Image (spheres, coloured by chain):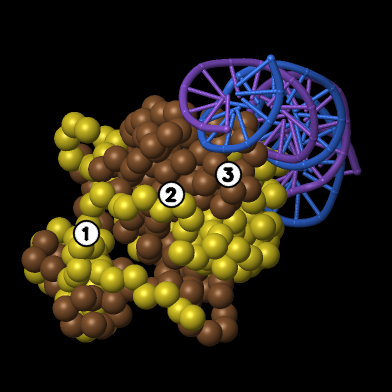
Chain colours: A brown, B yellow, C purple, D blue
DNA sequence: TTGCATGGGTTCGTCTTCCAAATCCAGACC
DNA sequence: GGTCTGGATTTGGAAGACGAACCCATGCAA
């Protein structure tokens, strides 16, 4: 169990977790990113899938573009006029491991019965895949063997 | 880049990511969990560190207890009356990898200059630690080598 | 025993955000 | 000219966030 502390080693203002939470830490934003990671790009597709109020969706998409998580482009279907689409940037794509880890947390602690609806396997070994901590050269480290390093 | 899709393979109602987001996906809740993972347990310590309005903090702590992420206990300091404290449960502790992954995302994409304020090393090899996907037996898998498996 | 300090809240009134429904708008097609 | 379609903005009411003040039980000191 974590020992009692009166305050965090890194204050929230300097903490990149706190910053990340400020950027993506709200329900709709996370759900939009979830859909985006599955390839959803269009306003009405987000809206239909998530049921997000159109006002909110419009605002969240704008924020996500401003913070560089989504790229607003134009797509054109033959015989339709050009429309915007919202595609994940590298920065947005880099959240995939975070959201997969959160999904697996949900699989374990929220679902209860049965198999999770989605999981992943390694195309080579065909083994199932989970998130873990690894050293630089890719060997797994357990949480007990991790030491916190504070800068300064 | 992710191919275009008109909807997600798992609808939000069945998705454990969406469920997880409903349970912990708001700013204050995530910030409270962050502090809790560092060992913060007491009302005023959360309040001082995060600046959360006391009404909000009170409500969020209550929810976190109800959803089983925090355990409300009593602590007693010599010469002080007994007071409640909020300690992470196993379910809450299991979020650590998720939040570390998010921290590392923030280190990479939000900070810009310099070293991150906090990082981790393996006590054995002294190498730095990152989050990654691994097979059951702990060998790393890259995102490109991961195949989605849908149940049913 | 009055007074004050402490920690963990609740109450109150305001102020912001959320939200659903309606409307707007530009291009494509008929 | 009328209508469809996708991507929005506007509007007004409902919900949630917020800051300040207050409450309350205990311990301690005068």
Circle 1 packing at 10 Å, graded few (<14), some (14-19), many (20+), is many
- The answer to whether the residue labelled 1 contacts the one labelled 3, judged by CB atoms less than 8 Å apart, is no
Residue nearer the viewer, A28 or A126: A126
The subunit carrying tag 2 is A
Residue that carries the numbered disc 1 in the rendered image? B130
Q: Residue A72: where, in percent of width, then height?
A: 37, 31
Residue at the (20%, 63%) spot, across then down: B144
Q: Residue A139: where, in percent of width, then height?
A: 14, 72
Circle 2 packing at 10 Å, graded few (<14), some (14-19), many (20+), is many
Residue that carries the numbered disc 2 in the rendered image? A40
In the shown orientation, is residue A122 left or right of residue B77?
Answer: left
Q: Is residue B126 visible?
A: no
**CA–CA distance between discs 1 and 3?**
35 Å
Q: Quadrant of residue A68?
A: top left
The subunit carrying tag 3 is A
Residue at the (20%, 68%) spot, across then down: B145
Residue at the (34%, 70%) spot, across then down: B148
Placement of the C terminus of chain A among the 4 image quadrants: top left
Q: Are the residues under marks 1 and 3 on the same chain? A: no
**CA–CA distance between discs 3 and 2?**
10 Å
Front tag of 1 and 3: 3
In the shown orientation, is residue B126 left or right of residue A80?
Answer: left
Q: Quadrant of residue B81?
A: bottom right
The subunit carrying tag 1 is B
Residue that carries the numbered disc 3 in the rendered image? A47
Q: Residue A27: where, in percent of width, then height?
A: 56, 47
**Element type where label 3 sits in the image:** helix
């Amino acid at each position: 169990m974590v020992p009692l502390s009166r305050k965090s080693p890194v204050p929230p203002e300097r903490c990149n977790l706190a910053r990340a939470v400020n950027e993506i830490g709200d329900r709709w934003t996370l759900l939009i990113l979830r859909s985006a990671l599955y390839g959803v790009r269009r306003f009405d597709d987000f809206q239909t899938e998530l049921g997000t109020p159109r006002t909110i969706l419009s605002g969240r998409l704008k924020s996500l573009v401003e913070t560089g998580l989504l790229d607003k482009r134009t797509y054109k279907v033959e015989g339709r006029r050009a429309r915007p689409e919202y595609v994940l940037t590298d920065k947005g794509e880099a959240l995939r491991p975070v959201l997969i880890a959160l999904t697996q947390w949900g699989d374990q602690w929220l679902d209860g019965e049965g198999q999770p609806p989605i999981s992943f396997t390694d195309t080579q070994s065909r083994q199932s895949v989970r998130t873990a901590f690894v050293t630089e050269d890719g060997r797994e480290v357990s949480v007990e063997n991790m030491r916190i390093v504070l800068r300064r």
